[in-house]
């Protein structure tokens, strides 16, 4: 899970860099924004799953 989370975060950082430095046009910026939103949701889901696992471990 950590590797997946970290790779998602790396992709998200790259998207942010492209959008912030203005190296892409409007259409690509919108597509990158959409992809970034998806990546954020995936990261949030992974973090929620990790939190549940930790909570379960603490209860054992």
Image (cartoon, grey):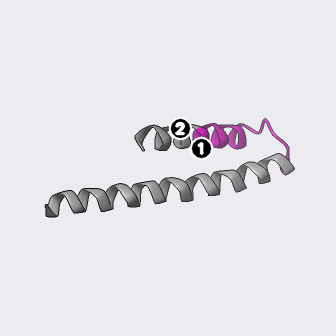
Quadrant the N terminus occupies: top left
From the image, tell me which residue sits under label 2. Answer: 7
Q: Is residue 31 left or right of residue 10?
A: right
**Residue at the image position 39 percent from the left and 59 percent from the top:** 49
Q: Position of residue 50 (x, y in %)?
A: 35, 54
**Residue at the image position 59 percent from the left and 44 percent from the top:** 12
- Place residue 34 in its image quadrant: bottom right
Extent of the magenta region: 11-26
SS for callout 2 = helix
Tell me, yes or no, whether the highlighted magenta stretch contains residue 51: no
Q: Position of residue 39 (x, y in %)?
A: 59, 52
Between discs 2 and 1, the one toward the N terminus: 2
Foreground residue among 40 and 26: 40
From the image, tell me which residue sits under label 1. Answer: 12
Q: Which secondary structure dominates the residues rendered in magenta? A: helix
Q: Is residue 30 left or right of residue 5?
A: right
SS for callout 1 = helix
Q: Position of residue 41 (x, y in %)?
A: 55, 59
């Amino acid at each position: 899970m950590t590797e997946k989370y970290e790779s998602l975060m790396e992709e998200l950082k790259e998207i942010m860099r492209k959008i912030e430095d203005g190296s892409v046009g409007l259409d690509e910026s919108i597509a990158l924004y959409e992809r970034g939103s998806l990546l954020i949701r995936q990261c949030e889901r992974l973090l929620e799953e990790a939190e549940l696992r930790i909570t379960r471990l603490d209860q054992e």
